[in-house]
Amino acid sequence: MTESTEQREAPPYLWAAITAVAVLGLYVATLAPTTAFWDTSEYIAAAKVLGIPHPPGNPLFVLLAHVFGLLPFMGTYAERINLFAAVTSAGAAFFWFLVSDRWLRAIVPVRLPRLVATAAGVIVGATMWTVWNQSTVNEKVYTVSLFAMAMVTWLAVHWGDDEPGPHRDRWLILIAYVLALASTNHMMSVLAAPAVAVYILWTDWKVLTRPTVLLGVAIAVAIGLTPNYVFLPIRAAQYPAINEGEPIGFFSNALMDVLNRVQYGKPSIMDRQAEVVAQLANYWEYFSWQFARDWGAVARFATALFTVLGLAGLWQMLRKDRRAGMAAGAMLFTLTLALIFYLNFKYGYSMYPERTDITNEMREVRERDYFFLCSFAFFGTLVAAGIGATMSSIAEYLSPRLDEKARWMAALPVALVCLIPLFGNRVTASRDREFAARDFARDLLESVEPYGILVTAGDNDTFPLWYAQEVEGIRQDVTIANMSLMNTEWHLKQLGRRKTPEFEPAKSLDMWKAGNDQPGAPLVDSTTKVPARGWPKPTGSVFALSEKELDSLPEYARLPGTSLKFGNVEVSFGNTQYLDRKDLATIFLIRDNLGKRPIYFSWSAGSFPDQTLGLTPYLVSQGLVRKLYPDPVTPKGPVIMSAGMGWMDLDRAKALLWKGYRWQSAARNRPKGWVDDPSRSIIELYGVIYAGVGATLRQQGDTALAVRADSIAAAVAASLRPRVGK
């Protein structure tokens, strides 16, 4: 078979489609039924409201997901957006199949074995732990980047095989457009560019000197970037419910700050946040998770096997098809060493647990394996080449004994290695039957009295609430004030201009329906000073400060004294000399809403209201939240001093724990434990609350109910262990 006829062989679109459909079927079978922790909730909600998630804003994702979410299938909106992740990842498998088949032609000349090797490699790439796990819930934007990267790689391969001329030139313009457009989803998408450059330089570098091509590429790039520079400022100016960074104004500082991720304040890549050796070791740790994470120590053998197969495949490509080998090598280098150096992560969340010199501030707040999703999926193409090379060696070894067909058939079972990650990751990569984040959001919101203000800590206890409110319409009357985001100007301004929606009793817990308000800390009409009846809707902003005043709150301020007093509430600062913006904002929320709106702190905020603001004498535990009382708390009726949780409204806690909360999601049996260690603390809140209430019930003599509470706390603890991948 000559090179020219080899190159002109029709791409196996049908085989690629069949493989992609099989991959999609696997993802659908293990699809998350609702939202999840971390950024999942933020991105699902942003898609729903056509909003702007955290920098860089990801406008292409928002537009595509919003349209996908309108399609009339799947049971819930969250399932549709999770399916969007599955479809884009399976679509990437389609293009990786075409790329792998083309790259294997010089290694496996016989069509059927080549297609089998290609399918096996693509399945390995699709079932690697991070790829599979991220393809069954829309946690991030990276499956869209993966799809774009695979498409661009295939377009470059296809361009390289096309006949020279204007028709082939148009492929380059399309490649430029897709790269530019995909960059408005995430810059991860452009990491296919080095492989494209290899193809261009190796095949026909002079194409870059033709004016028509250069002009076409320039126009294509300009059009592709419009979501960043047109959609973001226009949509931000319409103030959607999720509008992070508020990038209003064409080419404004706010827009540039969002696109350049200024909010995160990352240092120069030359200023390493961790030792380079540690950063490389962290990548290797994530790579070692990919092939059989469910199998514990056995996984290292799977990692060794596929590492050898992948590197052997790359070596064979370099030997037999230098252009393909150089392109694959460039892609591998870009997605590993170059990406590790560019990302410049801190020490990994689980790296070197024995090192006491590495503080929490020196570590990433969570595992960052998802940043390397494209690296892992692409490695499947190298595994395909390795499988093909192994099959070819077997066929060659058997050549004196068997005819050609028989020896290739004898080599086919090598492809069965693709089943290792399928079975080795099937438990922990799946998101099936996981409702914990959605139920936590509902339970936390329903813990708050109508029209209350809820102070939360960070992403994991806030993004699910955004999802619950904006996607499922749960307790939209609650104002969520996020402590970490209150250090930004835009979050404070959004809190200030927020119009409180009506409380809908019919959609809430029975305890919040008319006539069920408790007298422990009655709201007071700020005009008449007369205790209010029912749940009166407050008027005006949660801040008495104007938007200009909110905008001018300093990042840090020196304290005027040791305490401040608002009514009968004294905010005391102990030995603290400075407060940051979030502290000041919380103080203003208290000042401006006492007697007007109920104020709550989530238990996920930890000791912030106690240690920073000295509010312990005024806080009463009510399930997952603590309510701020307008006077120092004294034992009265259901309000008692609990064993270990401070003041507690036992009646309200029992009503929430036994009639309101969906604790079953937190306590359900998980055969391999809770995989996402960094979000473990959110689920553990259920255990803490039920154990604390159980101790208080036992203190009050209610042993039977105390035993029930203890059993739930124990079930939550059991569901979170053992830790996986350690």
Image (cartoon, rainbow, N blue to C red):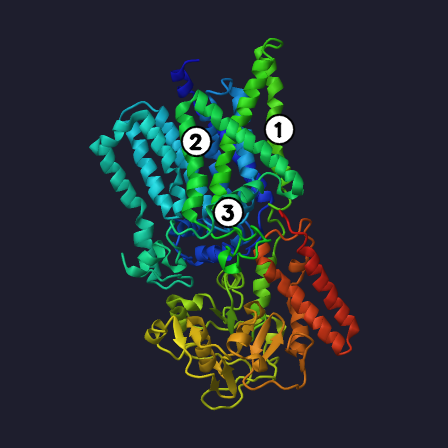
Please indicate whether residue 652 sits to the left or right of residue 271 in the image: right
User: Looking at the image, is 168 positioned above or below residue 649?
Assistant: above
**Secondary structure under the numbered disc 1 in the rendered image:** helix
Residue wearing tag 1: 416
- Mark number for residue 6? none
Q: Earlier in the sequence, mark 2 or mark 3?
A: 3
Q: How would you rate the neighbour count of disc 2 (Cα within 10 Å): few for under 14, some for 14-19, many for 20 or more?
A: many
**Percent of width and height locating residue 576:** 48, 77
**Mark 1 nearby-residue class (10 Å; few <14, some 14–19, many ≥20):** few
- Quarter where residue 685 is shown: bottom right
Q: Nearer the viewer, residue 458 or 538?
A: 458
Return the disc, 2 or 1, that comes first in the chain's sequence. 2
For the residues labelled 3 and 1, the Cα–Cα distance comes to 34 Å
The front one of 74 and 497 is 497
Farthest residue, direction front:
357
| Spatial CA span between label 2 and label 3 | 26 Å
Q: Which mark is residue 278?
A: 3
